[in-house]
Image (tube, rainbow, N blue to C red):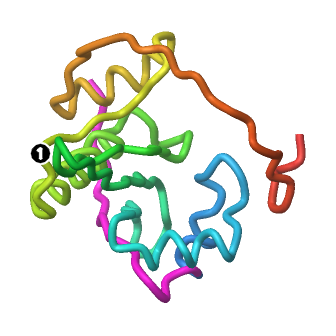
Amino acid sequence: MTRDVSIDIRRLGPGQAQAVAAAGRLFDDVPLEDATRAFLADPARHLLVAYAAGERPVGFASGIELTHPDKGTEMLLYELGVDEPLRRRGIGRRLVAALEALACERGCYGMYVLVDDDNEAAVATYASAGGHVTSRPLMIDWKLGRRDPGKRPE
């Protein structure tokens, strides 16, 4: 059994781009200033950051509200990241639960996430937060240009 870590989860918003930069090591790539400002300014986009020991960012979850005329609004859990040394200690589960609570508060009828079948850690995290596998869809994407600015070196 793993030991939960004491954390404080905060929702970041407009004017908090520096807080995103401070948590930058948790993201896949270095956060871009313009994209960060646009994300934080949009009321349908949400960024939750978990802090341990006061001000040390140790995880994040991002969500995007999607609205369709015949369905209403649901929350897409876009990305979840937890600092490597603190994984399997309840941080991811609590971030997902916090995003779920925010989705309920915002009137969303549901929440979903796409995850690779072979990502056992992610599947376990989402299941521990109450999620259920309902399908195994294919993801088909279009590469519309490569994002180079801010890319972490290989």
Residue hosting label 1: 109
Image-quadrant location for residue 109: top left
Q: Position of residue 101 (x, y in %)?
A: 14, 55
Q: Residue at x 41, y 63 (%)?
A: 47
| Residue 78, position as x, y percentages in the image | 44, 45
Q: Range of the magenta residues?
A: 1-17
- The answer to whether residue 33 is left or right of residue 63 is right
Based on the displayed image, in which of its 4 quarters is residue 123 positioned?
top left
Residue at position x 84%, y 61% in the image: 149
Q: Above or below — where is 31 with respect to 18?
A: above
Chief secondary structure of the magenta portion: loop
- x and y percentages locating residue 7 in the rendered image: 31, 60
Residue 74 forms part of the magenta stretch: no
Identify which residue, 93 or 73, lies in the foreground.
Answer: 73
For the residue marked with disc 1, what is the amino acid? Tyr
- Position of 91 with respect to 119 (left or right) is left
Vertical arrangement, residue 13 with respect to residue 117, above or below? below
Q: Residue furthest front?
A: 69
Q: How many marks?
A: 1
